[in-house]
Structures are given as structure tokens and as C-alpha cells.
């Protein structure tokens, strides 16, 4: 990659940001397609977010990704926000276009692309159970509603956050889907999982070896599809699903597909998915060797 005065700049705002694999994914894609772009990481503290967003314009950047802890607060500093991102009150991609900053959220669509293409699972008319109430759970829940899913059960370790997500969903999607809330302490109660077709761990639990499994896997019906958004390792939840011969996926596909959608927003080009997936796989293998 040769960087010069004509190189277009994109990147990611977050804090901390050292762990992000987005530069690896996007720079590999730019190189594959011969695009004169570079993707950089910017550690932006919460108190500096407004100045950082203004800098997108002043530095004539093409755009940025936005990650924890800025996905909601960044809406205050944008000129326009896509309808889906506005409903979720969460932005993960910003486009600088004609002097205006436009916010999008590609997380939910990235999840659906992974679920459909890799998992060959169509959520329409199905029943889902989602653990989590943060950005991933919010994006996934809104995306599922768009598919025509029949019902979504929500639970979270912090019940107040689950209630907020439930109310946001009810307010924005009205009667398109049946929603219910289960207290976290009751998540393994008999009967709750009986008709669930899709189970989603939308929390960070599972990132580390020895992390607990948040649901009793013996409760899964025989045809339940298990999706874990954690992407850095095969989680205990996925191992339990495999032992029971249940279809399952980890979060690598969601990571890749949400990145390809951001890539297209910035470049108007279709991202080289295979290249991005391969570079990510190589990155994980390198960490395993070092670790």
C-alpha cells in the first residue's frame, strides 16, 4: 500500500480501540481491489467525540466506523441519520457526502447476511430468543423484525436495559412482531424455550475460555439454530450446540458482513468477502500461535 496526498481516509472511532480488527479487514479489501484508500484506528475518548466528528469534515475524510462507547452519542453530531439507525438510536458507520455527515447502522444487516448465507436460516415466521440488550441485541432485534419474524423473547442480566430495548422495539415496529420479556433469573424455567427456533447470544460472554453458558443447552428444541455474536473463539455455547447436533454459527460472519456493508457505503463497490474472511482467519491463527 502506497499512501500519498490523494489517498482517501476512512477509519474507526472508539475507546479503547487497540483490539479492533476493522483496519485488517478493510485495508485488505482496499488492496485487493486496488483502491487508493487507507483505514486507520482513532482512539477517541468520550469527551473528545464531538471534536473528532467535526474533524471528519475538516480533514475531508470519506467516513468512519463507530464503536463502543460512541454508537449512541454520535447521533447528536450528525447532519442526517438513516431511518433504521434512528430507530435503534445507534450508528456504526458515518459517510461524509457533499459536506454532510450521514449515519448508518450495518450491524443488523450484517447479522442477517451471515444467518441467511452461512446458516441457511430464514427467520420469517420463526420464534427467537435473544440474550442481551446492548448495541448488538438492539441491531439484531430490529433486523429480525424486518424479516417478518413471528416473535422475540428478550432477557438480559441488567433488567432495566432489557426493558428499555423492549419499549424501543414496541414504539418503532408496533404490531409487526410479538415481543415478550423474561426475567434473567427465570430464563431456564420450563416451557420458555419449547418453541424457540433461533437462540442468539448477543452479549460478550464467551470471549474468554471458561466463560459460563448463559442458557441451559438441554432446553433447546431439537431444531434450534444457535447463533453467538462472539467472534474471537469457539465459545462454550457453540460447543454445547455441536454436541447436540444443533445448527450453529459464531460471530465471524456478522463481523465480516457488517464490514462489507460499510465498505460499500464508502466506496460504492462490492467488497471482496472471501479476501476479508481469509485475512481475518489468518489474524486469528496468528494470535493463537502467539498466545
Image: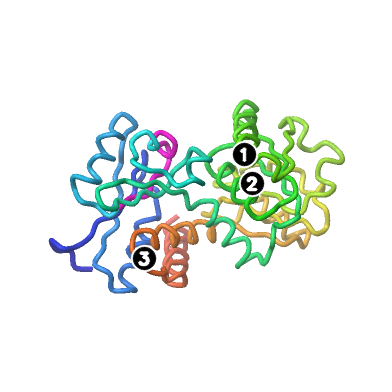
Q: Which mark is residue 268?
A: 3
- Above-or-below relation of 218 to 115: above
Q: Mark 1 and 2 residues: CB-CB less than 8 Å, in contact?
A: yes
Q: Is residue 67 magenta?
A: yes
Q: Secondary structure at mark 1?
A: loop
Tell me the CA gap for discs 3 and 2: 32 Å
Tell me the CA gap for discs 1 and 2: 7 Å
Residue nearer the viewer, 264 or 231: 264
Residue under label 1:
132
Q: Residues within 10 Å of mark 3 (few under 14, many from 20)?
A: few
Q: Residues within 10 Å of mark 1 (few under 14, many from 20)?
A: many
Q: Earlier in the sequence, mark 3 or mark 1?
A: 1
View extreme (top): residue: 160
Q: Residues within 10 Å of mark 2 (few under 14, many from 20)?
A: many
Residue 66, percent from left and from top: 39, 45
Q: Which residues are magenta?
A: 63-73
Amino acid at each position: 500500500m502506497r499512501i500519498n496526498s490523494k489517498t482517501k481516509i476512512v477509519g474507526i472511532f472508539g475507546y479503547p480501540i487497540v483490539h479492533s480488527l476493522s483496519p485488517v479487514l478493510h485495508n485488505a479489501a482496499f488492496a485487493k481491489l486496488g483502491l487508493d484508500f487507507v483505514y486507520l484506528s482513532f482512539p477517541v475518548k468520550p469527551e473528545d467525540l464531538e471534536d473528532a466528528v467535526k474533524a471528519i469534515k475538516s480533514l475531508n475524510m470519506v467516513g468512519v466506523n463507530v464503536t463502543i462507547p460512541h454508537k449512541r452519542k454520535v447521533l447528536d453530531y450528525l447532519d442526517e441519520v438513516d431511518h433504521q439507525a434512528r430507530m435503534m438510536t445507534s450508528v456504526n458507520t458515518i459517510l461524509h457526502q457533499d459536506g454532510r455527515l450521514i449515519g448508518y447502522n450495518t450491524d443488523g444487516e450484517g447479522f442477517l447476511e451471515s444467518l441467511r448465507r452461512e446458516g441457511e436460516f430464514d427467520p420469517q415466521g420463526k420464534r427467537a430468543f435473544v440474550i442481551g440488550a446492548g448495541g448488538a441485541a438492539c441491531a439484531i432485534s430490529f433486523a429480525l423484525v424486518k424479516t417478518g419474524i413471528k416473535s422475540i423473547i428478550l432477557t438480559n442480566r441488567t433488567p432495566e436495559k432489557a426493558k428499555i430495548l423492549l419499549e424501543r422495539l414496541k414504539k418503532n415496529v408496533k404490531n409487526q412482531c410479538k415481543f415478550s420479556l423474561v426475567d434473567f433469573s427465570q430464563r431456564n424455567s420450563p416451557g420458555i424455550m419449547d418453541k424457540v427456533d433461533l437462540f442468539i447470544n448477543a452479549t460478550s460472554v464467551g470471549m474468554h475460555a471458561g466463560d459460563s453458558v448463559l442458557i441451559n443447552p438441554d432446553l433447546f428444541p431439537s431444531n434450534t439454530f444457535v447463533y453467538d455474536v462472539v467472534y474471537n473463539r469457539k465459545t462454550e455455547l457453540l460447543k454445547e450446540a455441536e454436541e447436540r447436533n444443533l445448527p450453529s454459527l459464531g460471530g465471524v460472519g456478522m463481523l465480516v458482513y457488517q464490514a462489507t456493508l460499510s465498505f460499500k457505503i464508502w466506496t460504492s463497490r462490492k467488497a471482496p468477502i472471501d479476501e476479508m474472511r481469509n485475512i481475518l482467519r489468518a489474524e486469528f491463527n496468528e494470535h493463537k500461535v502467539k498466545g
